Amino acid sequence: MDKQKLEKTANEVRKGIIRAVHSAKSGHPGGSLSAADIYTYLYFEEMNIDPKNPKDPDRDRFVLSKGHTAPGFYSALANRGFFPVEDLTTLRHLGSYLQGHPDMKHIPGVDMSSGSLGQGLSAAVGMALAARLDNKSYRTYCLCGDGEIEEGQIWEAAMFAGARKLDNLCVIVDNNNLQIDGPISEVCSPYPIDKKFEAFNFHVINIDGNNFDEIKKAFDEAKATKGMPTAIIAKTVKGKGVSFMEDQVGWHGKAPNDEEFEKAMAELERAAG
């Protein structure tokens, strides 16, 4: 898929996020929108997956460690064909399989239930180790939040991955610089993020996480890296694609009202060209 098609697809993913959160009247649009380009590249370009066979034992694995940004994950899965796009508007509704956080037992394409912050990377490391022990070639990808990496369990998992030289593991940190209580640098700064992962024996790549050229180059470099896991530190804009949500901490976990929904969708329609 060329860059223009990826950008159009990411725009559709963003529309799905806004529709889902608006319909639910709750959820997390900010971090879903910042990671929309990462989700899009993973599911439409990078990962070896098949929507018709979501449990293929040889598929690449993905763990959303920052599980609250499920609206972005679900929108990517739906647009990729794992389930109907129309179902996104059932997000968080009573009886819907699209819960507020990813559920591997009920949602096609979800490899790991997540939501308790800090725990997803441990699961991803286990998957990467399993692939090695089973002599399988699948890769494991894990998306973490920059606020989430304040959790100690992240660094225990990173230490293990580095010590075991799990070069089939790729960690992506969505570095939008905002968490629920404000800028990460003020709440409990994890900076410098790149140096920390380097200290845990990761190959580290710093990119603009909303630029598909840089995203492609980073994932290609990660696949070519042998003998150590890779961490991609993706600098992004929280709320990316919706002007009044961009870089605003208040949109971490708030749904747009009807007027805001119309404004956001109009912006995304214009962006679609």
Image (spheres, grey):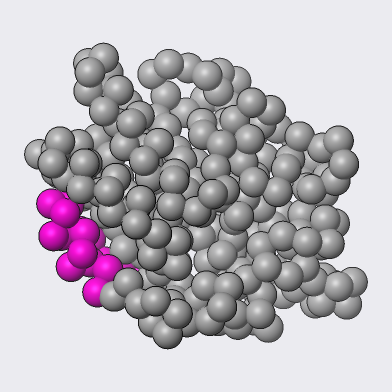
Horizontal and vertical percent for residue 2? 44, 51
**Compared to 247, does 20 lie above or below?**
above
Q: Quadrant of residue 180?
A: bottom right
Q: Residue at left 45%, top 38%?
A: 62
Q: Quadrant of residue 16?
A: bottom right
Horizontal and vertical percent for residue 84? 75, 35
Q: Is residue 117 left or right of residue 83?
A: left
Q: Residue at left 15%, top 36%?
A: 164
Whether residue 113 is visible, yes or no, is yes
Whether residue 216 is visible, yes or no, is no
Q: Is residue 104 left or right of residue 45?
A: right
**Compared to 244, does 23 lie above or below?**
above
Front residue of 169/200: it is: 200
Which region shows up in magenta?
192-209
Within the magenta stretch, is there residue 75?
A: no
Front residue of 200/74: it is: 200
Residue at the front extreme, as displayed = 152
Front residue of 48/169: it is: 169
Q: Residue at left 63%, top 35%?
A: 103
Horizontal and vertical percent for residue 17? 69, 57
Q: Quadrant of residue 54?
A: top right
